Amino acid sequence: MDVHQLALLARQPSAVLIERQSFWGMPKRGLALILANALFWQPLLVQAEGIVVSGPNTSLSQAGNGVPIVNIAAPNATGLSHNQYQHAVAQLESLGATVGEASAPWHRGVALDMWNVIATDGAAYQMLQGNGYGMNVDGYYDPDIMSYFGARRREHANALSSSVCAVALTGHYSLKNLHGAYYAKARMLVPELTRQYDEAFKNFDVLVLPTMPFVATTLTAADAPIEEYVHSALNMLANTAPFDLTGHPATSIPAGLAEGLPVAMMIVAPRFKDALALRVAQAYETARGAFPRPPGV
């Protein structure tokens, strides 16, 4: 793999396909582990440590003993090196994996743009105007909570966070002046995004991504500009927000440390297979063992 191929790998979410006769009692399909570190456009030229660690006596065919631990750790969010990628692949192959690639074209960029529109207009309508519940959806409604929330958010609006205020203002403006047209356009794109992930699940049992598109950052200063505060809040959602739109169940689990800072892994399953994501997470956690304590803690 040359540098050009390496850069291409950085720009498109890659995945490994693990084929087996039986995996946690499921039929032979595959486990996709997305190895790209979510800042896909960054060159993969920086060394990263601890990409793959396998538990004792763990192989892909040993359902009872868990799965190989894949720790996606990219210092400064610059990506995985060629050698580290090859090492990860070799480790998976040594456990009986056949390696392939998969991607969802809209995962990077498009999905988050869709979420921004839907979450802004939708949250302004449901969270604020609908007092945390909204209307016209089946399910449990708590009249006391709705009443309390509605009264208190008016009394203490100055206590709302900057990100909530931004959603309230932009959502109100959009709904009042654009009449929900852009919300409708974004919603009409969700079936295509869902289809892209469902297409991947025709071959893969689960998708595994970094929970955040970068390693842990320092807390935003209390006196930071509003732009910085909102950006730091929303910038973390690149990998998680798409599945809020499509309804694919996902769970996050600690995956290791990168330069002493925690890294988490998100496991995504097909729709209505929530238990599968939890079973994979449990197997991963069992194989990984205790989570290392960050230095100085």
Image (spheres, rainbow, N blue to C red):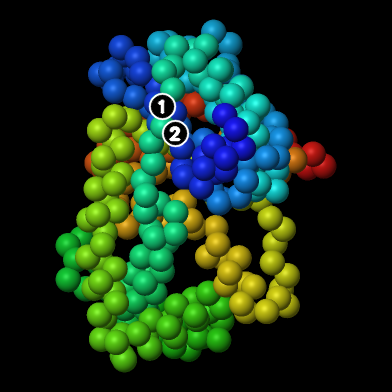
Q: Residue at x 55, y 62 (%)?
A: 235
Question: In the image shown, does 12 or 50 lie closer to the viewer?
Answer: 12
Q: Position of residue 116 (x, y in %)?
A: 41, 69
The three-letter amino acid code for the residue at tag 2 is Ala
Instruction: Tell whether label 2 touches label 1 (CB within 8 Å).
Output: yes
Q: Which residue is mark 1?
A: 100
In the picture of the structure, the residue carrying the numbered disc 2 is 15
Question: Does residue 152 show up?
Answer: no
The numbered dot on residue 45 is none
Please identify the residue farthest to the bottom as the structure is shown.
177
The image position of residue 91, as x and y in percent, is: 56, 17
Kindly identify the amino acid type of the residue bearing the numbered disc 1: Gly
Residue pictured at 65% horizontal, 27% vertical: 83
User: Residue at the spot x=34%, y=69% of the render?
Assistant: 118
Q: Residue furthest right?
A: 296
Q: Residues within 10 Å of mark 1 (few under 14, many from 20)?
A: some
Describe residue 14's horizontal placement relative to residue 10 as left or right: left
In the depicted view, which residue is nearer to us: 288 or 231? Answer: 231
Q: Residues within 10 Å of mark 2 (few under 14, many from 20)?
A: many
